[in-house]
Image (cartoon, rainbow, N blue to C red):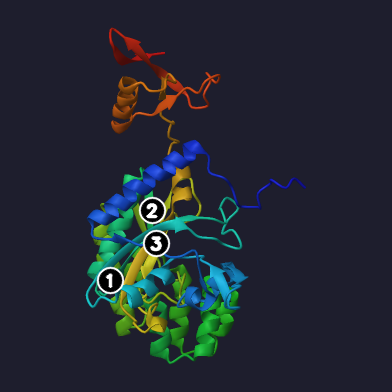
Amino acid sequence: MRNWLLPEYVEDILPVETLQIENMRRQIIDLLMVHGYQQVIPPLLEYVESLLTGSGSDMDLRMFKVIDQLSGRMMGLRADMTPQVARMDAHLLNCEGVTRLCYVNSVLHTISSGITQTREPLQIGAELYGHAGLESDLEVQRLMLQCLSVSNVTQIHLDLGHVAVFRGIIKGAGISQELETELYAVLQAKDISTLNELCTQLPACTREALLLLPELYGDGKVLADAFNRLPDYPEVKSALNELSTVAAELSSFVDTIAFDLADLRGYHYHTGMVFAAYSQGCSNAIALGGRYDEIGKAFGRARPATGFSMDLRELARLVKPATYPKAIRAPYQLKNPELESKIAQLRKSGEIVVVELPGQPNESQACDRQLIWHDGQWIVKEL
């Protein structure tokens, strides 16, 4: 085995893709900042307990773990930055009102989420803390779609779900926690036959509602069907009304919207609306988010929270590759103030200027112009 081979689903990012990713990062961070989202940089390593807070067992399986040589405690390499940002909101910032935070950095996964997915996503996202209303859900979802727009990602399909639909049915029927866990698992797996078996002993209205959930996927007709056929529990009706309102507000930002009332992704930490954006050319979601009001509870502050995240590396693959800009070639001359001044002026204006090193006329950086001395001044001439 060659020692320089990288592990599976781990890859280098070369100049052209790096340029594309960096341009996207700047555009998105600038957009988030002008909307009031302050950037934070959480640490790569934390104690495992902190990283797993509110994220469920799935994150535990996806996290690389190491022993801290100083304390002897188990540490984790972050697999998601949301718990870290929740900790920062709860303890370091400790604001009473609304807090808006954003972030961008690498996260590490023990296993890839798909055959084309990296184990080192470059996660960028935004979190809003301190507001429990639908208005903050809308703000975050609009912002996610604007981030995709400035990244030149087109043909957006938006999936909307709401964990309160399933939770409302469970609560209204008085179902035990043990059975709730089993029902959640089979709904996630779309295992209809097992779902039928689990619902056998339940009241008719509850059984019909749970068996209906996997069928409630599609356009606006799904909501109408849900309003008519699901139990008249307050939590269920409130969730359906929220989905209807959000769909109406976001319809002009996307190409298509669908509802998935059996989408229980992140059920262990999401508490309200969940959403996922898709685009042509990618089978996986390119952006994910939702409401998770209990995520800060373990840190002593169960503040309302909603947010989204996306992988910049995945986004870059969806957009036509950028062409690396051509450079200006400059001669190597020591103690030439006029030349140094001209090079500095060009670089300040955004031009790439590569100074030829002695004996190395062929630079790896492609140049289409050169800096020459002509009529008493340094000018740029086409090659």
Which label's residue is closer to the chain start, 2 or 1? Answer: 2
Residue at screen point 30% across, 25% down: 341
- Vertical comparison of 144 with 203: above or below: above
**Residue closest to the far right:** 1
Other residues around mark 1 within 10 Å, as few (<14) / some (14–19) / many (≥20): some
Which residue has dot 1 on it? Answer: 242
Which label's residue is closer to the chain start, 3 or 1? Answer: 3
Residue flagged by tag 3: what amino acid is it? Ile
Residue at screen point 32% across, 23% down: 337
Which residue has dot 3 on it? Answer: 41
Residue at screen point 41% across, 68% down: 82
Q: CA distance from mark 2 to mark 1?
A: 19 Å
Residue at screen point 29% across, 61% down: 38
Q: CA distance from mark 3 to mark 2?
A: 30 Å
Residue flagged by tag 1: what amino acid is it? Glu
- Vertical comparison of 347 with 155: above or below: above
Checking the image for residue 157, the label placed there is: 2
- Say which element carries label 2: strand
Camera-side mark, 3 or 1:
3
Can residue 383 be seen here? The reply is yes
Can residue 218 be seen here? The reply is no
- Say which element carries label 3: loop
* Residue nearer the viewer, 342 or 59: 342
Other residues around mark 2 within 10 Å, as few (<14) / some (14–19) / many (≥20): some
- Say which element carries label 1: helix
45 left or right of 169? Answer: right
* Residue nearer the viewer, 305 or 326: 326
Residue flagged by tag 2: what amino acid is it? His
Position in image of residue 138 (x %, y %): 26, 64
Give the number of callouts: 3
Q: CA distance from mark 3 to mark 1?
A: 33 Å
